[in-house]
């Protein structure tokens, strides 16, 4: 029986298992078209075998943006919320529909 790793696979491990460079494996996950089909298939296969899941926090740090939306609102029953809240709520649903991380906070 094969031992199952308790830690998440890294991009380096995926690249090594696929027989490609770390840069090539990274290009596969970022959707870069400058990767051969053979390399793309090898990386995707290795990622599936190893259970690799891209780390969104690491990607956010590297890209310098998180693609997250935070909304801070006063008391939901206040007039301010009712007038301005439609825009905030629309942005909230827009972000959720696009798979963005969303935080909704009540101001004190």
Image: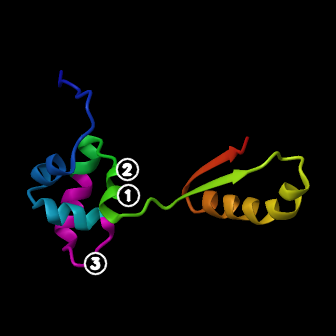
Which element is circle 3 on? loop
For label 3, the residue is: 33
Q: Residue 28 magenta-drawn?
A: no
Residue at x-position 73% and y-position 61%: 88
Q: Residue furthest front?
A: 108
Q: What is the total number of numbered labels drawn onto the structure image?
A: 3
For label 1, the residue is: 60
Q: Is residue 24 left or right of residue 91?
A: left
Identify which residue, 67 or 80, lies in the foreground.
80
The C terminus sits in image quarter: top right
Mark 2 against mark 3, which lies toward the viewer? Answer: 2
For label 2, the residue is: 57
Mark 1 against mark 3, which lies toward the viewer? Answer: 1
Q: Could you say where residue 82 lies in the image, as x and y percent from the top left?
A: 88, 58
Q: Could you say where residue 4 lies in the image, as x and y percent from the top left?
A: 23, 26
Q: Is residue 70 left or right of residue 45?
A: right
Whether residue 54 is visible to the viewer of this picture, yes or no, is: no
Mark positioned earlier in the residue sequence (1 or 3): 3
Q: Could you say where residue 10 lies in the image, as x and y percent from the top left?
A: 21, 45
Q: Residues within 10 Å of mark 2 (few under 14, many from 20)?
A: few
Q: CA distance from mark 2 to mark 1?
A: 5 Å
Identify which residue, 52 or 71, lies in the foreground.
71
Q: Residues within 10 Å of mark 3 (few under 14, many from 20)?
A: few
Residue at x-position 19% and y-position 58%: 42
Highlighted magenta segment, given as a residue range: 30-45
Pointers 2 and 1 in contact (C-beta within 8 Å): yes
User: Looking at the image, is 35 positioned above or below residue 6?
Assistant: below
User: Looking at the image, is 96 positioned above or below residue 33?
Assistant: above
User: Looking at the image, is 1 positioned above or below residue 9?
Assistant: above
Instruction: Residue 96: give its label.
Output: none
Q: Residue furthest top?
A: 1
């Amino acid at each position: 029986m094969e031992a199952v790793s308790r830690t998440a696979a890294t991009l380096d491990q995926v690249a090594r298992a696929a027989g490609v460079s770390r840069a090539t494996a990274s290009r596969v996950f970022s959707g870069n078209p400058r990767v051969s089909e053979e390399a793309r298939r090898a990386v995707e296969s290795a990622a599936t075998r190893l259970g690799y899941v891209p780390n969104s926090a690491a990607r956010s740090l590297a890209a310098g943006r998180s693609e997250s939306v935070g909304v801070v609102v006063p008391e939901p029953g206040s007039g301010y919320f009712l007038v301005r809240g439609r825009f905030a709520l629309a942005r909230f649903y827009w972000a959720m529909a696009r798979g963005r991380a969303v935080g909704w906070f009540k101001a004190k």
